[in-house]
Image (spheres, helix red, strand yellow):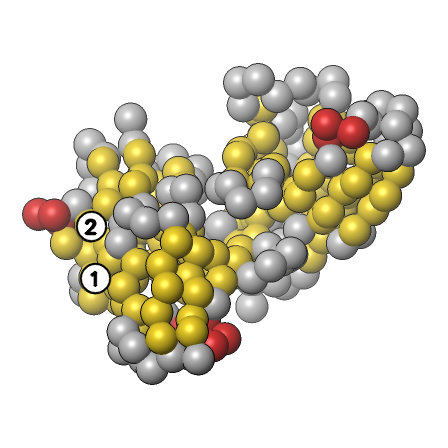
Amino acid sequence: GAVVSQHPSRVICKSGTSVKIECRSLDFQATTMFWYRQFPKQSLMLMATSNEGSKATYEQGVEKDKFLINHASLTLSTLTVTSAHPEDSSFYICSALGQPLGETQYFGPGTRLLVL
Amino acid sequence: AQSVTQLGSHVSVSEGALVLLRCNYSSSVPPYLFWYVQYPNQGLQLLLKYTTGATLVKGINGFEAEFKKSETSFHLTKPSAHMSDAAEYFCAVSEPGSQGNLIFGKGTKLSVKP
């Protein structure tokens, strides 16, 4: 149980385009989903927290207009990187938690974004 | 504020040797404690967690960790390392009732020599 998927696993796009990343909880209802960014050889940086049906809460320094997060259902959250630039290239990881799993986050496999 | 310190960004052991990855935390209340493992280009996989109850916690792949409140530690151990254990390991804490928000350590890369 507690499987989280992400799609796509890898994406290459041109500068100025938008990219959408999906995060799904496959066998539980995710009341809360988290989006992280990870730079090479570093720990995870929390970008935002989203609760189903509510607006996401962004961490300080994360541009909400740049990184659009939607959590429209209990099994799906999306992160859209708008007008992507090369500095947005990174590894993006989502996680989810919900009942009856308690307060344990389960992570997706990550999405590698490369902006040319 | 909570914080997590992982001593040693890189640990190297021989195959069959004891694995010890250190994690210390600071928290005003007894936290929930987690160890996650990350293989290259993959997400994080939960190894084990401590919330309440027995302070020695057993996880997957033969790993275990012991919560020591007096030392504010949650070190991860495995009696005998396998080559497949080579990965990045993250210790994390959350405050009960915080909706699961995690504070991560900086990670420790484990290398296993044949």
- Whole-Å distance between the Cαs marked 1 and 2? 8 Å
Number of numbered labels in the structure image: 2
For the residue pair A100 and B14, the one nearer the viewer reads as B14
The residue nearer to you, when weighing A38 against A69, is A38
Expressed as whole percent of the image width and height from the top left, the position of residue B41 reads 64, 56
Residue B51 vs residue B62, the one in the foreground: B62
Residue B5 shown left or right of residue A64 in the figure: left
Return the disc, 1 or 2, that comes first in the chain's sequence.
1
Q: Quadrant of the N terminus of chain B?
A: top left
Regarding mark 1 in the picture, which secondary structure is present there?
strand
Q: Chain of mark 1?
A: B
Residue at horizontal 65%, vertical 25%? A55
Whether residue A67 is visible:
yes
Q: Amino acid at mark 2?
A: Ser
The answer to whether residue B29 is left or right of residue A88 is left
Residue at mark 2: B73
Q: Can residue A100 be seen at all in this image of the molecule?
A: no
| Residue identified by numbered label 1 | B66
Q: Is residue B51 left or right of residue B36?
A: left
> For this rendering, which residue is in front, B81 or A5?
B81
